[in-house]
Structures are given as structure tokens and as C-alpha cells.
Amino acid sequence: MDRRYWRWSAGAQLVRLPSMMAPLAFAVLATQVTGSYRLGGLMMAVFVAAEVIAAGPVGRLLDRIGVARGLRLLLVLCAVSLVALALVSAVPAVMVACVVVTGALGGGLAGGVRALLGSVVKPTSLERATSIDAVIVEIVVVGGPLVVALLTPFGGVVPVLGMAGSYLFAALLVPQVAVSRSRGGSWPRIGPWLFCAFGFGHLLSTIEVASLPLGQRVGGGPATAVLVVALLTGASVLGGICYAWWGPRLRLDRRVRAVLLLVGMAVGAVLVAFGWNWPMLAAGLVTVGVWTGPLNTAMSVHLQTTLPADRRAEGFGLVFTAQAAGFALGSLSVSVLPLTAAPLLGAFSALIAAACIAATPVAKPVTVEYPPR
């Protein structure tokens, strides 16, 4: 990987960091303002809802005005909105409005950032670059709450200002790329891949959100939730590293890879569902985790090579929205279903997604352009 990739990666992680900080940052700010974390829960709910609703339209806008230029504008506007949130932190209704604006502006950021990757790495390096990125994302997921914890002693609004700063630094790192157009490409059938993203998020959330009761079921205390998440995350990092090395050498069609990986995750979810003792639960967590990085990479690279160049921000935005919707459904299922049933439902969702992808005809690849140095 060359310098252009690492610049893109640093910017991508800074774009993602505020979303990882948001749950705890909003809770800290709400507790300071109202004495309760409940307003923070409402702020997070409307933040996610605004992101999901706006992801497709914002992605389409980025494709129209130029992804790099549009990202810089949106990142600055997101930072301004968060600064406004910090300034009006004494008025709960206005706080919620600022959060809605931030979520709507940021809905297409993840898709836009991902759409730029094909312009900063050579086509032959795309799979390895995506795998490395999947590993780094796991660090950002863990690092977001840690950053909030480090900033909170300086004041309840400081973590929110930290989120704004992350967006501003990300805007400085957005790479300069040439505007590219697909040649002979058309909007592919991405419905099965949207369901793949949905099933992926659904299955993972039934385990991540249920980490505490899963640990308690095998006789552990509250601290075991950390161990459950650590096993899942560690296996995901290991799988991503291995796939970064072996993935580019595989000759299997990415549809076949996705089907096998979804089935592997489903098997792991079944083990988790019936994991009444530590060995079986750990086996299930590792089985689920080790396939998450490779599946995310296979799905991402397939879309990169089949989406038209002038629709990629929109396409990736829709995929991330589908994944978020799956995560939301998984979270809901954990709250209303028995502990055994929730992971089984996630496994069923993954198997349905695998069947949909298996029935999808081979998509015609479009040209992936890499600008000259």
C-alpha cells in the first residue's frame, strides 16, 4: 500500500470516528444538561434515523457534484452543526434539531469515502486494501468510546467538539481524485447484496447487543460482556488479516465467497444460540468473528467492480444503510425474543441472504479507473 492509500485510510477513520463516539458523547452531554442519560438515547435514535433516511439521496448528490468535493463540503457542515450543538447545549429541543441536521448531512459520508478507494489504489490492490481497512475499522469501533472517556473530564461538551474536530481533520485528508466515468456500465442488481449487508448487520447485532446476557448465561458477571466482545472482535481482526494475505490469491467468484462466508457466520450464530457453556459460546463467537472481515471485503470489492463509477457513492450509501437497518432489527430482536431465539433469527437472515446471492446472475464488471501519478 502506498502513501495515497494511507492518507485515504486516515481520513476514512476520522470520518467514522464521530459515529463511534456519538452514543457515549450524547449520553455524557445529556446527563450534564438534564441529569439523565435518556435525552442522549433520543439524540442517538434520531441521529441514526436521519443517517439512514438521508444516505441514498446524499450519496446521489455526491455522485452528481463530485465525491471528493462534496465530501469536503459535507464534513465541514457536519463540524459546524456539532459546534452549534455544543453552543446550544442548554436547550434540549434545539440540541435534538442539531443532531438531526448532523445525521442527515452525514448520511452519505461512509458511502462517499468508500467510493473514493478505487481512485487511490490500483485495481490489483483493491482487495488487500479493503481487507486492511476492515481490520482498522475494528480499532476505530473500540477507540471511539475510549476517546470520549479521555475527553469527558474536560467538560460534557468537549467530546462533541472532538467529533467536530474529527470531521474537520477528515476534510483536510480527502484526496484529490480525477472524475471518472464508467464505460458501458449500468446499474447492477444490488438487491441481493443489500440483503447480504442487512443479514450481516442483523446477525452481528444479535450477538454484540446481547453480549452481557450471553456472558451471564455461562455463569459470568457484567465484566464477561467485555470478554464476549473481545473474542468476537479479535476473531474478526484475525480473519481480516488472513484474508488480506490470501484473498487476492483466491480464484473463487465473489458470489460464491459471500455465500460460503454467510453460511459460516450462520453456523457460528447457531453455536452461540446454544452456547450454554464457555467452550461452545467461545467457539461460536470465533466462528462468527473470523468470517466478518472477509465477508465485508468480498461484498465491498464486488460492488466496487460492478457499480458504475458515477453511482458508487449512492450504491455504497445504500449498502451501509441496509447494514444499519439489519443492526437495528437485531437490536430489537434481542429486546423482545428469548436469548436463544435472537441469534437463530440472525442465522436465518444470513442464510436467506446467501440463497439470494446464489440465485443472482453474474454481474458485468465495469472499468475501475486508477488515475495516473
Image (tube, helix red, strand yellow):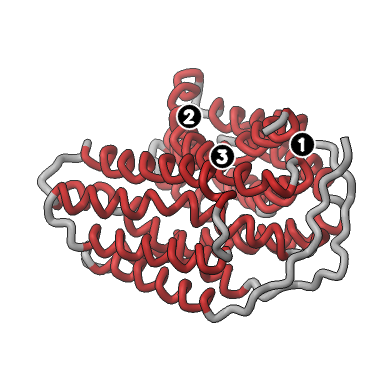
| Earlier-in-chain disc, 1 versus 2 | 2
Residue 337 can be seen in this image: yes
Residue contact between numbered discs 2 and 3, judged by CB atoms under 8 Å? no
Q: Amino acid at mark 3?
A: Ile
Residue 373 location, x and y as percent?
87, 35
Instruction: Name the residue tied to disc 2.
Output: 148
**Residue closer to the observer: 38 or 7:** 7
Frontmost of labels 2 and 3 is 3
The residue identified by callout 3 is 132
Is 201 displayed left or right of 58 in the figure? left
Q: Is residue 54 visible?
A: no
Q: Which residue is mark 1?
A: 174
| Residue mark closest to the camera, 3 vs 1 | 3
Residue pictured at 81% horizontal, 49% vertical: 67
Which kind of residue does numbered mark 1 sit on? Answer: Val
- The type of residue carrying mark 2 is Val
Q: Would residue 150 appear left or right of 163 to someone viewing this image?
A: left
Within 10 angstroms of label 3, few (less than 14), some, or many (20 or more) residues?
A: many
Residue shown at 64%/45% (left/top)? 98
Sequence-wise first label, 2 or 3: 3
Residue 46 is situated, as x and y percent measured from the top left of the image, at: 55, 55
Q: Secondary structure at mark 2?
A: helix
Q: CA distance from mark 1 to mark 2?
A: 24 Å
- Residue in the image at 81% along x and 44% along y: 68
Q: Which mark is residue 163?
A: none
How crowded is the residue under tag 1: few (<14 C-alpha within 10 Å), some, or many (20+)? many
